[in-house]
Image: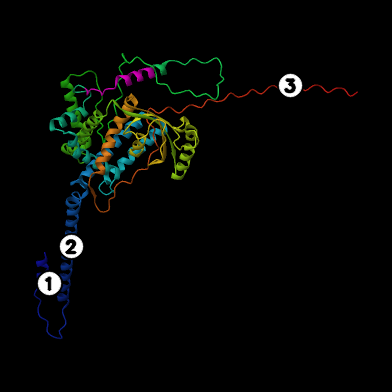
Amino acid sequence: MREHVRRWLRWPVRPVAPGRRLSRREREQIQQRIVVAVAAVAIVFVLLLLGVGAVYQYLYLPRQVLVVVNGEQITRQDYWKVRRLELLNQISQYRQLATLTTGQQSVQYQQLADQAEQQLPTVEEDPVNESTLDQMIENLIVVQRAPELGVNVTDAELDEYLTQLFAPGPLASPTPTLGVDPTAAAWATATATAAATPTPTPASTETPTGTTTPAIEPTVDLQTPAPVTPAPAETPSPAASPTPTIMPTATLSPGDLRATATAGVGEYQRQVLERAGMSLADFRRLFVGPLLTREKVQRVLEEQIPLRAEQVHAAHILLATEDTARSTVEELRNGADFAELARQRSIDSTTAPNGGDLGWFPRGYMPEAFDDVAFSLQPGEISDPVKTQYGWHIIAVLEREDDRPLTVEMLQALRQRAFNTWLEKQRENSEISWRAGLQPLPTPETPPFMPPPNAPPTPTPVPSPTPTTPAAEPTPAASPTP
């Protein structure tokens, strides 16, 4: 193209004698050549711009690295696929909820579905969604660190799990539930029985004052505890989860279950994955594999929670400042009542009404600094102020045992927290490099302090009896004036 322009500009023109004026025809020829040359240059420039734009849009930008996690890259192309899948599943879920509700609630769910639908075509132009990218980072860390726990996922396991996701019934025997110590099971049975037994209404409504009812553990027959199966812990799942349209049906043979699941995978691929720009291999790599790995890691971590452990029965006073905590400790050293100060000053609204009683708990449930101090105290001892993310604690140990059964509630709480605790440590020990312009999610605000599940329940205030106002005595009639 450039050579043609040069030739046009050098087109032979009859030499003009000095002082001779160009004819009109000659001037028009020169102008035409200039116009053609300028147009050719403009076309070349536009083609270059279009070519550079296409290379940037379809080659460079999709391969751009957003985050590097322990040396492994997350590209913008993979992010686009996951984000679109997340929006498509949100659209499906919100529309289903809109059909199951009525009135303003149904309208709100439909509006959320419409908003997700509007975001779908602009995923590649919109700013990176932080929560979606953060979920991808967590998935990658789980897959990378799972082998340290002896967890590996084979292709056969991945195929079976993908089929199970879309099957209307279980394809294999369910995983056995985790155990409970027999003593703890007996406690749970006794507690459930006591809760189901109606409490007789006392004849008198007067409540004696100045008395305290001690907390007494139920007396049970430890030889024949009733079996108790704890509720399964919730499995954390990524934000984008498949929503198969296949509904559970009547009893099906194993062959029918697999045929139905295979049809469901194909339908999901046509209706959802293709619209998300995601192949079935992408779906297995970006979603199914991490989800299965999460479940296997969580199971291993849950199995590591012991059924019995060293425990302390403690109380605490939670205060906002160190100065207030130290002055409170001085009062306690001088004989002030711990429970009364907890009721008056503790900012932990859950345990303050109980005098700060936290019940029994093992190591690993409370913050590390709290645990270190609580398990260093003997019954009757009170700690100096202890700093955690919640504030300043003053800890009093009431009892301790070296080998005490974990209650059903405590086991469930520890098993549910096991994965999140492990993931948090793995993330802290990971090398995460962000692309320029991207920043990690801000540190979430500290949630309110949560006492152990075995802490005494907050007492329900008993209304004091309202004194009955005596009826006004009739005013005697005025005596006649003598």
Q: Is residue 145 above or below residue 9?
A: above
Element under label 3? loop
Q: Earlier in the sequence, mark 1 or mark 3?
A: 1
- Residue beneath label 2, please? 45
Q: Residue furthest bottom?
A: 19
Q: Count every numbered label the image shows and give the total.
A: 3
Other residues around mark 1 within 10 Å, as few (<14) / some (14–19) / many (≥20): some
214 displayed left or right of 117 = right
Residue 167 is situated, as x and y percent measured from the top left of the image, at: 21, 26
- Residue beneath label 1, please? 9
Indicate the colouring scheme.
Answer: rainbow
Q: Is residue 468 above or below residue 340?
A: above
Judge by depth and name the residue closer to the eye, 364 or 152. Answer: 364
Is residue 109 visible in the rendered image? The answer is yes
Number of the front mark, 1 or 3: 3
- Residue beneath label 3, please? 473
Question: What range of the chain is rendered magenta?
Answer: 174-192
Pointers 1 and 2 in contact (CB under 8 A)?
no
Task: Give the residue type at disc 2.
Answer: Phe
| Quadrant of res 8 | bottom left
Specify whether residue 210 is painted magenta.
Answer: no
Element under label 1? helix
Q: CA distance from mark 3 to mark 2?
A: 108 Å
